[in-house]
Each structure stands twice: as structure tokens, then as C-alpha cells.
Image: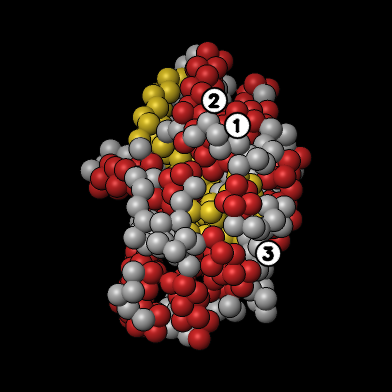
Amino acid sequence: MNHPSRRQLLAAAALSPLLAACGGPAEPAVPADGVPRGKLSVWLHQTRAYDAVFTPLVHQYVQEFGGVDVTPLYVPVNQLDTKLLTAFAGGAAPDVFRIGGWTFPGHARKGRLAPIMPKPLGAADAKAVAGGYDQTAINSLSYEGKLYGVPTDYTICYLYYRRDRFAEAGLDPDKPPTTWEEVAEYNKKLTSADGKKVGLQWILGNPQWTVMQLLALVKGKGGSILSSDNTTATLATDAGVEALRYYASVGNPKLSNPLSGFGLFGTGEAAMLVSGLFAMDLFPTLSKKLEFGKIFDIAPMPRFDAGPAVAPAYTWGWGVSAKSKLPYTAWHFINYLQRPDVAAKQLREAGSLTPIAGWEKLSGADQKAIDIMVASAPHADFGPQTPIWNEMAKALTDAGDAVAYGKKTPEQAAQDFDRAMRLAL
């Protein structure tokens, strides 16, 4: 997407009708020249690498558009959703926020999000905005036919593996497993007698990662977590039960680390992990010896021998509060952050991939990582897009953890999940 020129902004003089058509509140004192003005509050979760890109962008934006003041608030990622819900409940939500794409349907149903405003995004209509992005990524930010955000930090999951652990176990580091059946075989060879070292370790107790991990297994078995219209829970099927049984068969839930599976992979206690593009930069920060291509590596997501390929995917997205008094300025600022040159810089310096159209040609990330994502894109699956995602993810995490810790049989866990969802759906 192209950042609007001042000439284009001048052509946007009649903004009040546009704002009404887009369902947003009239921005007070909108200048006739269409240049953004006002004080924007922006919330996002902070990473050191992304902050190094975002902070200069904020300064540049404020300098270029002198009538705008941007105040960012960095919130720890595990606190962002709760803090935002509290802000919405108290009528004090920020103008702009960067949140998980999986939360958009729930916020949209509650009327908390403003639909996108095409003009400040440099487009004539919502369809044109959507055409500037990877379709699967931007579709995940829609609800009931309306688009509520633009995607950033897009990833399709990989299988991460420790080359050093593979070599120690007599496995070829250049031949990672390609099927879940092979993962199970490798897991046996990589698991120590005392269980303190394992092959594949799941990220347990984390709703987002539980959904993606079980999504790959359930759909890989030909099943589903929810029905195609997201109205019925469907885990208690042969496919769902078999997926949960596999889930319980690998890893060791008794292993602990403050960073969960990420930390266990970093120490070498776990030899395999399902994760996203961001982990390419995360692991070297945990230990200087974790050199990509030498100590650890990546491979495409495995598939079951007789099942379809499933590549769990997610994206974060920029959204605007439905109660923002500055919707035009908010979307204009977002557009500034989404320019192709910024996308390239974010990928190069922060490992954050903005899925603009043609993202596969962006330079900056390791080419192997991009190549795997490109090959996996036809199989990208964002999981159930439902306004009760939080309830679904919690119930699925309860089911996954219960079988992993041996507290329930796969059959019991699947039935309990479906029962919980019948109350929520």
C-alpha cells in the first residue's frame, strides 16, 4: 500500500460524509486540507527489536505531520488483552492498538472496533485495501463481512529443531522429520532415559499456542475443532481423539522453564518445537551459542502420512477504537506504519513480517524462512475465527493439558471440550 501524498490528502477535503459512510464518529476540527491532526494514544506489546523500529517511525511521523502528537504505551504481551479489556470497559480505550488477529472477531462483535477507513489508507474502498495484503492474513481481521484492521507480524509456523541434539542421537541434522509419524520416531531417540531431555516439547498452558498445535494435529487427521460455520464443537470425533492421543504421546509436561517450551528448546532439553518466525531472533537472545543453521534449524510443519498438509498461521493487526475521536488520523498513522519500505525494515531489523502483497519478495529475513513460508502459504490455517475465541482457546488448553498430564483420557478431554463449547456457542 502506498502512503498518500499531500496532493491526495488535499483531495480528501470533504471528509465528514466519508466518516459517516464508514461508520466512524466525525473527527472534530478536521482540517479542510485533509492533513491529520490531534493527539493519538497507541498501545502495543513491546519487543526490544520492534521498539528499535517503531520509536523512530513515531518521531518521523510527528515531524512530518506537525499537528499530530503520538503517545505510545508498551504493554507486556501477556498483559495486553486484559489491560485493553479493562480500558474498553472503562471507556478509556486507546485510539490505536496492535493486537492478536484472533481477538478481532470478539472485539468487533462487542462494537469496540471501528471498521477500516479506506481514504487515509490510500484506497478508494475496503476491497482495495484488502487487495494490498495477503488475502488469508487480512481475512482473519474481518467479522460479518466488515474489515476491522490491517495485518502485521504475520507468520506460518515451522518445526524448529536442534541440529546438535539430532547429531548426538545419531540423526541426520540435514534430514528433519517431515511427518508426525517420523516426529514420534525421532522423539523416542531424542528422549533420555530419565525424561529430562525430550524430542518434541509442546508449549503447554498457553491458549494461543495450544490452538495452533492442536489445529495441526486435528485437521491433519481430517477433523476440526469447530464446525465450518463455527457453531458446533467437533473435537469429540475419531480425528479429535486421535489428535489428543498423539498430543499426549510426546514431550514431558513435568519439564519446566520460565519461558515454557521456548526456554526448554533454548537450553537443549527439548530438541523440537513448533513456533513462528519471531523465534528465529528470539533463540539467539537466550544464548549466544544458538546460531541458526549451526545449532538450531527450521523445517516445514509435519503432516500425517494419510492426512492433509496443515500450516497453522497467525497475524497481529492494527485496529482503531470505535470510540476514537480521531479515526481519520488513527488510520492515517497506521498507513504510515504499513508502507512497503517500513515493512522491509521491520522484517530486516525486527523479524516482523507485514503481509503486504508481494511479501515473499521482501528482503531481510533468512531466505530459508521465507521460502518455507511461501511453500506453506497454500496450507495456511488461522483456526476458528469466532467471537468466543478466548473461551474456545481456554477449553482447548484445558483439554490438551489434561491429556498431556495424564489427568484425562483423550475421549474424556474431547467430550469435555465439546460440552464446554455447547454452553458458550
- Circle 3 residues within 10 Å: few <14, some 14–19, many ≥20: some
Pick the front one: 157 or 33: 157
Q: Residue at x 36, y 78 (%)?
A: 413
Q: Position of residue 304 (x, y in %)?
A: 63, 73
Q: From this view, report whether residue 277 is shown above or below residue 241.
A: above
For marks 2 and 3, give the CA distance. 36 Å
Picture quadrant of residue 122: top right
Q: Secondary structure at mark 3?
A: loop
Q: Secondary structure at mark 1?
A: helix
* Mark in the foreground, 3 or 1: 3
- Look at label 1 and name its amino acid: Gln
Q: Position of residue 388 (x, y in %)?
A: 38, 64
Which of the two discs, 2 and 3, labels the residue nearer the N terminus?
Answer: 2
* Mark in the foreground, 2 or 3: 3
Q: Secondary structure at mark 2?
A: helix
For marks 2 and 1, give the CA distance. 6 Å
- Look at label 3 and name its amino acid: Thr
Q: Residue at x 48, y 67 (%)?
A: 250
Pick the front one: 84 or 392: 392
On residue 178, which mark appears? 3
Residue 160 visible at all: no
On residue 53, which mark appears? 2
On residue 247, which mark appears? none
Q: Residue at x 60, y 47 (%)?
A: 164
Residue of label 1: 346
- Look at label 2 and name its amino acid: Val
